[in-house]
Image: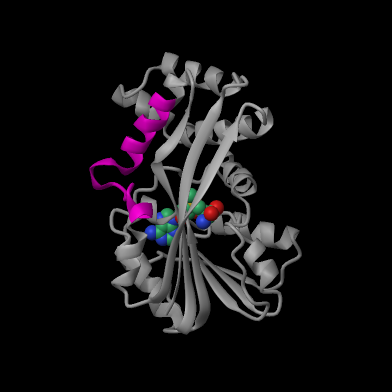
Amino acid sequence: MAAPFYSLGASEQEQARLYRQRELYGDTAGIKFSSTDVVCEIGSGVGANLWIAKQVARGRYVGIDVKSKQNEAAAKQACTMGLKNTEFRTAGGDNTGLADGCVDATFCRCVLIHQPDPIPLIAEMCRITKPGGRIIISEPHDASYHCGPDKTHLMKCFRARTHYAYGDGRGSPEVALNLYPLLIRQGLRDLRVTPHVITAHGREPERCRAFLQNWLGIIATVADSLLEMGAVSQRDLDLAAAEAEDITAETFLYQTMWIAEAIK
Ligand SMILES: C[S@@+](CC[C@H](N)C(=O)[O-])C[C@H]1O[C@@H](n2cnc3c(N)ncnc32)[C@H](O)[C@@H]1O
């Protein structure tokens, strides 16, 4: 399989950012698994969602990621956490190599947005989930991300990154808003799609700073390409970094993730 275009890469900085991002987002809005469940995470990255493996202490967690470097970091993380019920496989999310109906639940977060076509990954999640099992997907809607006031360079760089990463068919920037139609077509039942709205304001400067640093980290993964293309200048990037540090009483940021949960 040709490696899919994936803008965030797997540098050490990016791997560290994924752990910090998980801290910021929390355990995905209270999703719970039973302790004996077998759960497969598609696009499991560096193991930021190993809270799932902890929940399924008497079951099993299988992480699937297309990048072996991510799986190596995830396996190390599982070891650090003392988890003995994990397995990591290097494979595309559309071709996991797992048997039909072999897991109780599948989970996927911040992965479909990176796919030119998310349907094969969704179909694979449905295939490997047992009848009556759960399918859970959480995706960000990048266009909803906003911070202000006077954070024009930060927003400019973030939007340029969104266009570079997902524009012209390189990803699916609207997938978060399309989870309902995409999943209902798979014949799933009890489908619920809910927004997970995240805000931070100047009364919580450390929280604001942490979110804005996360946005800067997302931009940093493609900064060289953005400069080369002329989409942003070095001055834009420098001013964006300064704006992320300049938290006042008026600072406000907003971002929405959408979470879909359904039964096969
Ligand atoms: C933004 S990270 C999210 C990781 C993790 N789900 C989390 O919430 O921290 C996306 C991950 O999906 C992986 N990925 C991207 N496209 C994939 C594909 N087609 N199949 C499997 N993994 C993929 C990347 O290598 C990366 O580790």
Image coordinates of residue 71 in percent, x first then y, are 56, 59
Q: Quadrant of residue 214?
A: top right
Image coordinates of residue 76 in percent, x first then y, are 67, 58
Closest to the observer: 114 or 181?
181
User: Is 29 left or right of 260, judged from the image as shown?
Assistant: right
Image coordinates of residue 264 in percent, x first then y, are 42, 80
Image coordinates of residue 257 in percent, x first then y, are 47, 50
Q: Residue at x 61, y 19 (%)?
A: 248
Q: Residue at x 48, y 41 (%)?
A: 255
Q: Main secondary structure of the magenta part?
A: helix
Work out whether residue 66 can be spotted: no
Q: Quadrant of residue 37?
A: bottom right
Closest to the observer: 47 or 178?
178
Closest to the observer: 54 or 192?
192
Looking at the picture, does residue 101 appear above or below residue 33? Answer: below
User: Is 217 left or right of 231, judged from the image as shown?
Assistant: right
Work out whether residue 176 can be spotted: yes
Q: Residue at x 41, y 40 (%)?
A: 144
Magenta region includes residue 226: no
Looking at the picture, does residue 75 appear above or below residue 110? Answer: below
User: Is 264 left or right of 35, judged from the image as shown?
Assistant: left
On the rendered image, what quadrant is the N terminus found in?
Answer: bottom left
Q: Please name the colour scheme applied to the rendered image.
A: one colour
Residue that extends furthest to the top in the rendered view of this protein: 235
Residue that extends furthest to the left in the rendered view of this protein: 168
Q: Which residues are magenta?
A: 155-177
Magenta region includes residue 169: yes
Closest to the observer: 22 or 224?
22
Q: Residue at x 49, y 83 (%)?
A: 102
Looking at the picture, does residue 172 appear above or below residue 213? Answer: below
- The number of discs equals 0
